Image (tube, rainbow, N blue to C red):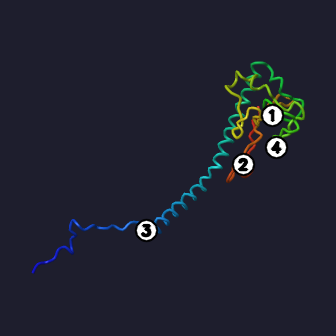
Amino acid sequence: MQKNHSVLAPNASQKTSRPGFTLIELIVVIAIIAIIAATIFIAIDPAKRLHVARNSRRWSNVAEIAKALKTYEADNASLPASIDSSSGSVQVVGESLGACAGVLCTGQTVIGSNCAVSDLDTVLRAYWKKPPVDPSTGSDNDTRYYVNKDAYGIITVGSCDAEGEGLGGTGTAPTIEVTQ
């Protein structure tokens, strides 16, 4: 009697079939990956990272403006003439702010007339490569930085538009200000 081995071992003409993934299995895997990605995305909070990065740039710009003003003062024995020290209000650094009534700076009182320090980009040209601008606007017409000189000659430079650093950029915005 002859044994039939073809049942135990497939011959070359028979194909072995491997089961693939079903549509349901693929959908479940994609859903799990999407849930993990969403969780990581929320945990990282890229919007918050952008707000923190822009505030960091503002800190650097404020320090750069203050340093340039103090260096100018040391070289020329006075601050630029366009900086007004007649009131406790601030002036916004920029070229063409228009009417002073429309100029706002969060947390500050903007001076009623002569509200713009418009010549810093030319007067301080030797002290920086390019005048700093706010990272969210990029405008040099209204840099969103302010300057105040008190009666004692103390300079305060700050940012008008600091952003909250809480979840999604909400929360209380930090005061970005340097006094020298």
Report whether 106 appears left or right of 87.
left
The earlier-in-sequence mark between 2 and 4 is: 4
Left or right: where 91 falls relative to 71: right
Q: Amino acid at mark 1?
A: Val
Crowd rating for badge 1 (residues with CA inside 10 Å; few <14, some 14–19, many 20+) = many
Amino acid on which disc 3 is placed: Thr
Residue 180 found in image quarter: top right
> Label 1 to label 4, Cα distance in Å?
13 Å
Q: CA distance from mark 2 to mark 3?
A: 47 Å
Q: Is residue 160 above or below residue 83?
A: below
* Residue 38 marker: none
Q: Indicate whether 74 appears above or below 39.
A: above
Image coordinates for residue 47, horizontal then vertical, percent: 65, 49
Measured in 3D between alpha carbons, the distance from the residue under mark 3 to the one under mark 1, in whole angstroms, is 64 Å
Which secondary structure lies at badge 1? strand
Q: Along the horizontal axis of the image, is 31 left or right of 131?
A: left
Residue at x-position 84% and y-position 33%? 98
SS of the residue under disc 2: loop
Residue at which label 4 appears: 107
Q: Nearer the viewer, mark 2 or mark 3?
A: 3
Residue 22, disc: 3
Percent x, y for residue 178?
75, 35
Task: Check disc 2 and report the residue beneath it.
Answer: 164
Query: Mark 2 and mark 4: span between their CA atoms?
Result: 14 Å
At label 4, the amino acid type is Gly
Spatial separation of the CA atoms under disc 1 and disc 2: 21 Å
- Could you tell me which residue is drawn at 25 percent across and 68 percent down? 14
